[in-house]
Amino acid sequence: MPEKVIPLHMIPDKGSEILIINGKQYLQTNTAMFTFYKRSKGELSPYFLGLKEKKIYGAKCTNCGIIRVPPFMERCPDCEFAAMELMEMPDRGKLLHTPPITYFAHSLFQDMAPFGRGRVLLGESITALPILLYTTKGVLRPGIFKRDTPVKVIFRDERVGAPTDIFAVPMSELSEEQIGKNGLQESELDWTNPQEPQVKETAEGHKALDKALIGLSKLSDGVKTSARAQHDLAGWRRVIRVNTSGGSFGIMIEDGRLEISAGENYSPDFIIVCEDPGLFTEWVEYRESLTNAIISAKLWISKNSEFKTIFKLDRVPRSLKRT
Amino acid sequence: MARKVAIVGAGQTPCKGRWVEKTYWGLAQMAVAAAIKDAGISVKEVEGVIYGIYNDIFELSAIPEHALHGIIGMANKPGMRVTCGGATGAYAMLTAYTWVASGLYDIVMCLGVEKATDAFDFDSQTSTPEVIKTIAWSGDTFFEREIGWTASDSYAEVVLAYMDMYPGDLSDEVSAKISELLCQQAQNNPYAQRRGEIVTADMAMKSRYIVYPFKLLETCVYTEGAGAIIFAEEEKAKAICRNMATPPVWITGIGAANEHHVAGIQGNHKTMHRILSDHIAARAAYQMAGITNPLKEITVIELHDAYIKQLQITMAEMGFVPLGRADDLVKEGLMLPGGPILVNPSGGLTYAGHYVGGSNMMSCWSARRELITRGLDRALVHSTGSTIAQYACILILERG
């Protein structure tokens, strides 16, 4: 089946439900505000068509000579609307500033997080090209991209004439040959996934895990009596195996319930590796978040797309504090 | 010559994360009824209305105000909607002010209303990702939306560029302390969304990142609610206020500026480490109000704190601290209890709530309340909006 402009899994069934608040009934109905388009790229078309051909275009004012990338207008407003001419730009440049990293993405980008979105100055351009930023070395963390970080624009293998046809990686992650090659594609990069870290079990780790499991068990019990925490996990199902220096345990999310079990006799949806089980003692007390632990490399997850589950879990200790 | 204009009434709904019990129609009626009662006038005396409604998608209507006009008692009178992203509310109040100052009308109401969390992501079974997506239709839809633009990551760009320029400023400790302070102040706001919640600086420090460098407890909330402000020309303002034994609150300065939406290093393109929109708008408002030293001449500030670190930069851009020394707001005690300025006594958008089209009305309601109840002289109401803090609109209020 061809890909749809709206992912089918995002489209709800028709339906409605009654909510009761302070003894009164309120009706809410599943609906959507949608419009389909055949949207013209108009005067911007040469830029997007250029991406398909692995070229990046800018525009140069025929009066003042200023170059702007992307070529977002045909006339220069600073020169009484003098014409601007397209010109091909280099695919290497520097970041305008330290870019943000999105960990909690909106609903269309949930499976892409974490990702960086930066602005790169190419050649003599005075404006910066907005672009996705990736590292080939695992989870994107602060510090990899900074102001003036040299980057190279990489082209997707399959290009459709969209801003997502390109992204940038740090030049420090590329070979000299790759840096010098025009039109470098994503399949030419080394995307070797980081291997699952192996954790050695220790006596100290076992002791810390025993303590953490007591806290996790209390957390599980707390969810059973907290409507707010149940809401955090409503409609969600995941089995997670957690490997630590005290051994493994499981976290089961089952539509508003959270269960903890020792051992590793189950098939997980994804794996968490965390050398120090004490992190979970801090987490249940709302003194540490799993999200920040991943960002600071204290915790490893096998699937980046499961950040959305991590966010749901991170809500639970706070909800219990607020209950 | 512009006529003098005063605020003579203000009404506000409770700010809630979700108003299942009300549509935006019902919220609008609540706020208007409260504002009319506050001014002690009949709605029949109001000659026109300006609507602040930010996003069509939240209301499921391309002209959402059409359905409000009759139900708030304004049938057969002029009504106009203003939408300017996060700055919608302040720009709507600017418009209401001009309707009165120009002599076109004597009494004009400004109504801000917004739903948000009716939006729901059926995939994750939560509202927030869909709310963020709805707002994400507000960015550059040719070059940026498809690569994940959101309001948060665009403001984060500005904050990070500022931190590149001033690496010693905007420490996490100071941002967390401000978060704690705003939480405490929200407890005095009967309409605040996060009333009853305790957030310490330590909790804010350790809260999870949503978009680096923004943390959950240093970011504004999503809110549903409504607020209404009534503006009147001088003679009617005096009569209304005499009747209600309340001082008029005059609008003595207004400034606004929108920057370029494209970032660059020359010309009029956005300078990413600045929020020039705030700077230019503040300068214009000060000039109109005759303010030369804002730190000494303004005591109450209701600032659009979409993000705490942006609040700090905005305070610098408005001249309360030098650029690069925004941490002085806490380190020098400027905005701490006992300091010379009271910043976001409402709790701000982080703790009181952010119903986008009208949260500036909530800020205005709070600033007026502080001027009247504390007997203070002058307040500033600030708004910011659009991608990379592109828009700003600022009002100066003075107690009569």
Image (cartoon, coloured by chain):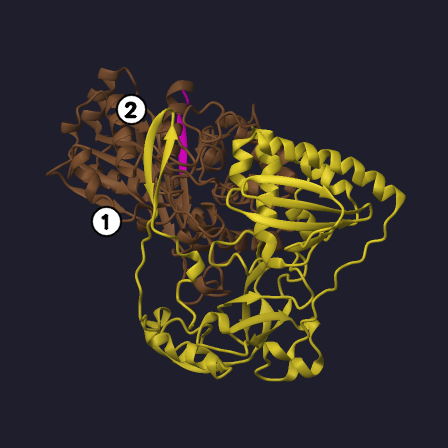
Q: Mark 1 packing: few (<14 Cα in 10 Å), some, or many (20+)?
A: few
**Quadrant (top left, top right, bottom left, bottom right) of the N terminus of chain B:** top left
Which residue occupies the extreme left position in the image?
B76
Count the numbered circles shown.
2
x, y percent for residue B130? 43, 50
Q: Amino acid at mark 2?
A: Pro
Residues B117 and B70: in front is B117
Whichever of callouts 2 and 1 sits on the residue coming sooner in the sequence is 1
Q: Is residue A94 left or right of residue B2?
A: right
Q: Disc 2 marks which residue?
A: B248
* Image spot of residue B5 (x, y percent): 25, 32
Q: Which shade of the palette goes to chain A? A: yellow
* x then y, percent, for residue B233: 20, 31
For disc 1, the chain is: B
The residue stretch that appears in magenta? B375-381
The answer, for residue A248, to whether it is visible in the render is yes
Say whether mark 1 and mark 2 are on the same chain: yes
- Per the model, the C-alpha gap separating discs 2 and 1 is 33 Å
What is the letter of the brown chain? B
**Left or right for B106, reference A254:** left
The kind of residue on which mark 1 rests is Ile
Which residue is pictured at 47% across the width and 58% down the height? A108
The residue identified by callout 1 is B63
Would you say residue B378 sits in the magenta stretch? Answer: yes
Drawn side of residue A316 relative to residue B282, left or right: right
